[in-house]
Image (cartoon, rainbow, N blue to C red):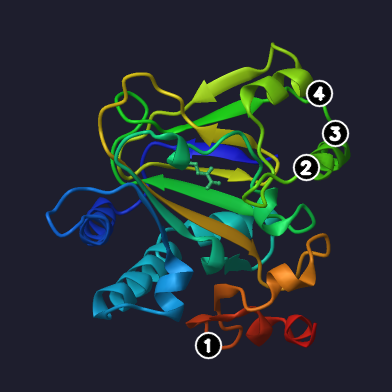
Amino acid sequence: MVFRAFNSGLDVDQLRALREEIEVFSSDDQGTALGVRLSVSRMHRQPRDEAETAFVRDVVKTFWSSGIDRFYATTYERAPLLLLEHCTVRVQSTLQDDNYVPWHLDANFYGFDVPMLTAWIPLVDVGTETPGLEFADLGGRLSSQELRRLWLSEPLDDRGRRALEDDRMLELFGNDVRRQSIRLKVGGFCIFDQTILHRTQVMAGARNKRIALEFRIADRDHLPRDIPPKSLKGMLMSWRDRESGQVRIGYSGALFPEVSQS
Ligand SMILES: O=C(O)CCC(=O)C(=O)O
């Protein structure tokens, strides 16, 4: 189980530049901030303008210069793969129901079979006046096999994902699960694997707009066997070329020929 929070370490100027790009995408014609979820893979597939193309390039560059790739490589002794398909920018102008994310595991994205890390990167300070993330510590009450079985037996919701509201958390784990929210300033981030339960921090009276970026990192050399091949097909990814070390962006079939044949 991997969970780490870092108070600093990322390039603050680089993050500020990304935030400025996002502010433009997430404002209407009058300059009013909208609550949105920007999909980096959509911007790559169907860029609406040069600004979107430049943004994808900047996001990829931010990842490969962040050190998060090395964290993955050191932790698991595997080569990192950036799952650009699941790289999301979330802009929350107010915490309305439709942008609050309930308790879930990021195994929703890439299963349990291959080690996967999420790096959650706030582009504004979070945790006091602006919601960050909240984590549930199951305190070792389930083995990883039990957690996997339990998670996969939960039904999919109407968005096709598995998520738990508070009453279901209570039913499953009782009322003594320790919950922890994080406070982070820009430049800090947290990183956790796909077995860590988390949600948008619930914060009464939250005032400020929240902008956060999520990277999801998996293994360049192994496909997960526990998620349907159709979910892997045409998935946008970024990796380093084995020989030259150069950063590549491409679809799953370029790296895993078995996916394009499925
Ligand atoms: O940023 C958030 O509030 C939650 C996002 C999240 O956990 C996810 O997209 O998996």
User: Is residue 76 visible from the viewing direction of this image?
Assistant: yes
- Upstream in the sequence, badge 3 or badge 2? 3
Indicate the position of residue 5 as horizontal and vertical percent values.
Answer: 49, 36
- Name the kind of residue labelled 3 in the image: Ser
Mark 4–mark 1 Cα distance, whole angstroms, equals 45 Å
The residue where tag 2 is placed is: 155
Mark 2–mark 1 Cα distance, whole angstroms, equals 44 Å
Indicate the position of residue 195 as horizontal and vertical percent values.
Answer: 70, 41
- Name the kind of residue labelled 2 in the image: Pro
The residue where tag 4 is placed is: 141
Which residue does the image show at 37% across and 72% down from the upper left? 56
Indicate the position of residue 13 as horizontal and vertical percent values.
Answer: 22, 55
Quadrant containing the C terminus in the rendered view: bottom right
Q: Secondary structure at mark 4?
A: loop
The quadrant holding residue 83 is: bottom right
Where residue 46 is drawn, which disc sits there?
Answer: none
The residue where tag 1 is placed is: 244
Mark 3–mark 1 Cα distance, whole angstroms, equals 40 Å
